[in-house]
Image (cartoon, helix red, strand yellow):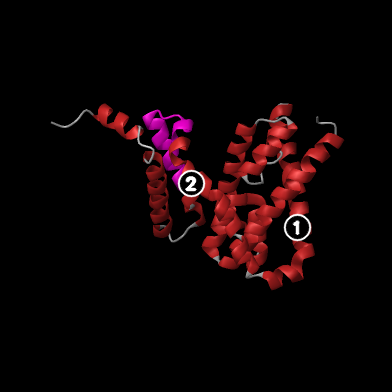
Amino acid sequence: MMPNLNTVWVYLAGSPLLWLTATLLAYRTATVIYERSGRSPLANPVAISVALLVLVLYLTGTPYKTYFDGAQFVHFLLGPVTVALAIPLYQQIEKLKCNWFALLAGALIGGAAAIACAMCVAWALGASPLTILSMAPKSVTIPIAMGITEKIGGLPTLTAVMVMLTGIFGAGVAHYVFKAMKIEDDLTRGFALGATAHGVGTARAFQVSEEMGAFAGLAMGLSGILTALLLPLALKLLGYF
């Protein structure tokens, strides 16, 4: 006799490898879709895999904490992967030496513009002060953004959602923006993508070229550091907290 489906699910849900396996399968499925679409930016593997996992969690009634407990090995690997971004960047050391001032200025101005735009749009739409603060660090990578939000008195969970949406949207439309503005240099495109779409944008940049990915990783790191150091100070001077 076929075992009861409920019993099978209860058994599987208790396995620590279930959600790790589900994550890998979702990403593999998303990668196949991405390849079959002709590597269209709109078929971003990260966005598709997130959508697939959210659908599975919703249909099975699984709390996020249960999922995270099973898939936390992927989270653990984010640290080594981030450090490993230094390798392709080192291979671009000559370009880095020649353009260090422009890159630093670009990260500073780009970060300030992203923060100002996010807070102004939220304010114009009538958002509460708590929501406005939570929107401020939406263009830096999730761990840094959540830490900043907690420090300035916002909602870290709201920030995490906005950071992910920003990354997915940025990675999806960047190709068309660069094409419309006739920006073809991989250094420029990669740095812009990393500064605005953080981790998801960096992953997208590496799909295009190693040089583009290297400078996207640099932009992601610089933006995170500068935002963590300067945003709380700027908001304090402006009297936000």
Mark 1 sits on what residue? 106
The extreme bottom residue here reads: 94
The residue identified by callout 2 is 74
At a point 70% along the width and 73% down the height, the residue shown is 94
Q: Amino acid at mark 2?
A: Val
The location of residue 48, given as percent across then percent down, is: 45, 47
Q: Residue at x 69, y 41 (%)?
A: 137
Vertical arrangement, residue 210 with respect to residue 137, above or below? below
Q: Check disc 2 and report its element: helix, strand or loop.
A: helix
The one nearer the camera, 119 or 63, is: 63
For the C terminus, give its image quadrant.
top right
User: x, y percentage for residue 87?
Assistant: 60, 65
**Secondary structure type for disc 1:** helix
Describe residue 28's horizontal placement relative to residue 159 as left or right.
left
Q: Is residue 6 left or right of residue 173?
A: left
Is residue 71 a member of the stretch shown in magenta?
A: no
The kind of residue on which mark 1 rests is Gly
Q: Quadrant of residue 83?
A: bottom right
8 or 140, which lies in front? Answer: 8
How far, Cα to Cα, is label 2 from label 1? 31 Å
Dominant SS type (magenta):
helix
Looking at the image, residue 143 sits to the left or right of residue 34; the answer is: right
The magenta region covers 47-67
What residue is shown at x 72% (from left), y 46% (from top)? Answer: 114
Q: Count residues near mark 2 (Cα–Cα under 10 Å), then give few for <14, some for 14-19, many for 20+.
A: few
Residue at image point 65% right, 62% down: 215
Place of residue 98 in the rendered image (x, y in percent of width and height, measured from the top left): 75, 71
